Image (cartoon, grey):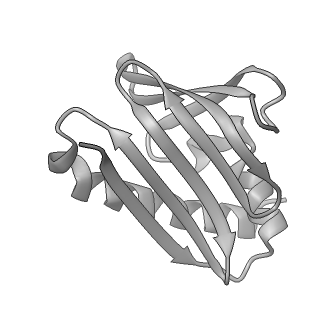
Amino acid sequence: MPTRLAVAVPTQLPAERLFQVLTDWPRHPEWMFLTTARVVAGDGHGVGSELAAFTGFGRLGFVDTMVITRWEPPTAVAVRHTGLLVRGTGMFRIAGGRLFWAEELSLPLGSLVRPLARAFMRWSLLRLVRLAASHP
């Protein structure tokens, strides 16, 4: 059974600015908890582009491969997780003064990690908003 996760944080920043920082994949370590991301196919800015994100400490962690399935600047980007460990869908959306992040994933021990995952997602979104507000 898929694990559903969703968080939202308030923001007064322009959607264009949030989307710009959100989709600057090499900047993910600046706001996403223990994660680096890179483009592996395409330009990273459109449907069909492929990404790889590593989450962990040093060499201990996992790679999450993704394909962008929705690209609607400046309000939405969605991915399909295609890795061995993480499978499912994810979406970021900017609307109504809020930044949303939702995932529907097949995860090992999904129900056990849900509270911790949601906390890290919320923390990461708050960092993204702060980063977008403070850096060009």
* Residue beneath the point at 48% across and 57% down: 102
| Above or below, 95 relative to 33 | below
Looking at the image, residue 6 sits to the left or right of residue 38; the answer is: left
| Above or below, 100 relative to 53 | below
Looking at the image, residue 116 sits to the left or right of residue 44; the answer is: left
Q: Quadrant of the N terminus?
A: top left
**Displayed quadrant of residue 79:** top right
Q: How many marks?
A: 0
Residue 62: x %, y % from top left: 39, 22
- Give the residue furthest to the front: 1
* Residue beneath the point at 73% across and 70% down: 133
Residue 17: x %, y % from top left: 81, 64
**Displayed quadrant of residue 72:** bottom right
Looking at the image, residue 113 sits to the left or right of residue 15; the answer is: left
Q: Quadrant of the C terminus?
A: bottom right
Residue 7: x %, y % from top left: 44, 67
Looking at the image, residue 27 sits to the left or right of residue 103; the answer is: right
* Residue beneath the point at 43% across and 62% down: 123
Residue 94: x %, y % from top left: 68, 69
| Above or below, 54 relative to 123 | above
* Residue beneath the point at 55% across and 35% down: 80
